[in-house]
């Protein structure tokens, strides 16, 4: 499969390409369509992907280092699962805090704060002297992880042209769920295996691993100070001059233009100021927004709950089958090649096929792949093959839901809406591993995958009630329906 990314362009003043009849050519929509995809947007995507890459490594760390943590602190599977739960619950808090910050004070502020908190929590994890301290530090890490993805989705959705939005939003999961998942288990295999002795052996190598994960994130924070603020956020606050300044930076087509884009050009006027609702989470649960939150939030529960369950439990499940820790990490890394292809496939499909039919189809195929794993994965080859196929559909579905989510809410509550939907999935990530352990104790790996197959069947039903957003401007999908139903 080949993925075609939009070419770099510079604002030329030419007319934007024809839009579908239900996409109004507002000043902001038309301006972003004229600007197209420039080096500035590429820079924004690179910074977002870098942060999400480190997030992915951190998210997978507890499962990968689980046996070492169990030995160091004298804990069992239940206590180890609780560490994962603390991280996921911290992620829920982080999503809610980050979403509010992004809609109240701006996307840039929230993104910088997320990585700083994540780094602090990682360093505390490295210094943990007991189980309780480690548990607390993972909650702090979760707070930093939580808002990173949802705020990143919000700012990217608001910075790109309608025709590029789906594909570019999907690229974020190529970094986190695709490359990140593969690289994370390869990284853990390296530092806990060949480099483990240099890092002090089993008792201290996991501590150095937390340090290695935390420090590079500070470089991303440094470069993020150059991120342009979302012009849609600025217009929702009535800051027309600042919105024109951001659009001038985007139109410069140059990274240098982020610092000095030259004289500000007029792309939008006071007539383009977006409707503003109260910056409150209550708005996410009113009218049209409530129906969208319920539908896509339910889908997120099923999809994210399945993903976290497998990422966390797979090394443990394989060790229980008699494979060594190194083998289990290597197997999990190989399976996650399917995740990379799933994210890449979603990146391609998101720009060509409507959201609803894509998510429902992926859920059906994911259900079939989970049942196939439960029934047929009886040897190493089939474990790797069927595991990779399952991971393909898991990541494909999660990526499409991440593309869909920020398209559902008006600008003034977009980050909060995305945070709630993803937060529902976060709760599933905290709860479903315990349910999976229940099925594992009674039916082994087959029980876990049959549980996941049932979740995907329910996902098909939930996605049926989501509104179609493919090919429509954000204003068409979000602002008008909310005003009509206000």
Image: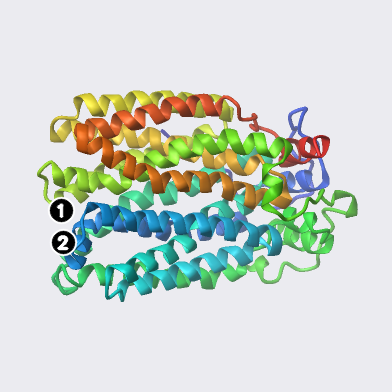
Q: Which mark is residue 326?
A: 1
Residue 147 visible within the image: no
Dot 2 corresponds to which residue? 193
Q: Name the residue: 30% across, 57% down.
A: 62
Q: Name the residue: 20% across, 43% down.
A: 317
Near mark 1 (Cα within 10 A), the count class, few <14, some 14-19 or many ≥20, is: some
**In the image as oriented, which residue stretches furthest toward the left?**
322
Q: Name the residue: 78% across, 43% down.
A: 30
In the visual, does 380 lie left or right of 257? left
Q: Nearer the viewer, residue 255 or 375?
A: 375
Residue 251, image x and y in percent?
71, 56
Residue 255, image x and y in percent?
61, 64
Q: Secondary structure at mark 1?
A: helix
Q: Which mark is residue 462?
A: none
How far is mark 1 from mark 2, CA to CA? 7 Å
Residue 427 visible within the image: yes
In the visual, does 423 lie left or right of 11? left
Q: Nearer the viewer, residue 429 or 179?
A: 429
Q: Nearer the viewer, residue 40 or 385?
A: 385
Q: Is residue 484 above or below residue 73?
A: above
Near mark 2 (Cα within 10 A), the count class, few <14, some 14-19 or many ≥20, is: some
Asked if the residues shown at circle 1 and circle 2 are in contact, with their CB atoms under 8 angstroms apart, the answer is yes
């Amino acid at each position: 499969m080949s993925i075609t990314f939009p070419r770099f362009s510079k604002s030329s003043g030419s007319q934007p390409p024809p839009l579908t009849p239900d996409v109004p050519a507002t000043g902001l929509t038309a301006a972003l369509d004229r600007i197209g995809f420039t080096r500035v947007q590429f820079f924004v995507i690179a910074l977002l992907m870098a942060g999400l890459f480190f997030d992915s490594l951190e998210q997978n760390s507890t499962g990968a280092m689980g046996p070492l943590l169990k030995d160091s602190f004298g804990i069992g599977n239940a206590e180890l699962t609780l560490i994962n739960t603390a991280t996921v619950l911290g992620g829920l808090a982080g999503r809610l805090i980050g979403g509010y910050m992004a809609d109240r004070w701006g996307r840039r502020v929230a993104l910088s704060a997320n990585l700083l908190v994540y780094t602090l929590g990682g360093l505390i994890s490295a210094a943990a002297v007991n189980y309780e301290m480690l548990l607390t530090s993972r909650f702090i890490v979760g707070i930093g992880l939580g808002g990173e993805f949802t705020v990143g989705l919000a700012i990217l959705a608001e910075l790109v042209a309608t025709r590029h939005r789906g594909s570019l939003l999907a690229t974020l999961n190529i970094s986190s769920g695709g490359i990140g998942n593969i690289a994370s288990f390869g990284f853990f295999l390296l530092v806990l295996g060949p480099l483990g002795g240099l890092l002090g052996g089993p008792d201290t190598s996991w501590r150095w691993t937390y340090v290695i994960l935390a420090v590079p994130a500070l470089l991303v924070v440094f470069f993020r100070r150059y991120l342009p603020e979302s012009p849609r956020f600025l217009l929702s606050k009535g800051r027309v001059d600042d919105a024109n300044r951001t659009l001038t930076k985007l139109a410069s087509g140059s990274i240098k233009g982020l610092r000095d884009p030259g004289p500000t050009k007029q792309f939008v006027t006071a007539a383009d100021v977006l409707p503003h609702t109260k910056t409150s989470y209550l708005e996410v649960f009113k009218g049209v927004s409530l129906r969208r939150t319920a539908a896509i939030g339910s889908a997120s529960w099923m999809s994210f709950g399945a993903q976290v369950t497998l990422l966390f439990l797979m090394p443990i499940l394989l060790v229980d089958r008699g494979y060594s820790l190194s083998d289990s990490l290597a197997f999990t890394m190989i399976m996650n090649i399917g995740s990379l292809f799933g994210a890449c496939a979603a990146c391609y499909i998101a720009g060509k096929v409507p959201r609803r039919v894509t998510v429902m189809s992926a859920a059906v195929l994911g259900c079939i792949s989970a049942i196939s794993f439960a029934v047929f994965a009886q040897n190493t080859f089939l474990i790797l093959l069927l595991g990779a196929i399952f991971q393909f559909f898991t990541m494909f579905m999660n990526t499409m839901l991440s593309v869909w989510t920020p398209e559902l809410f008006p600008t003034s509550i977009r980050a909060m809406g995305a945070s709630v939907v993803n937060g529902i999935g976060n709760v599933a990530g905290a709860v479903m591993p315990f349910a999976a352990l229940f099925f594992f104790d009674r039916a082994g790996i087959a029980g876990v995958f049959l549980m996941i197959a049932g979740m995907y069947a329910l996902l098909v039903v939930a996605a049926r009630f989501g509104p179609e957003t493919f090919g429509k401007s954000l204003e068409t999908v979000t602002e008008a329906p909310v005003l009509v139903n206000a």
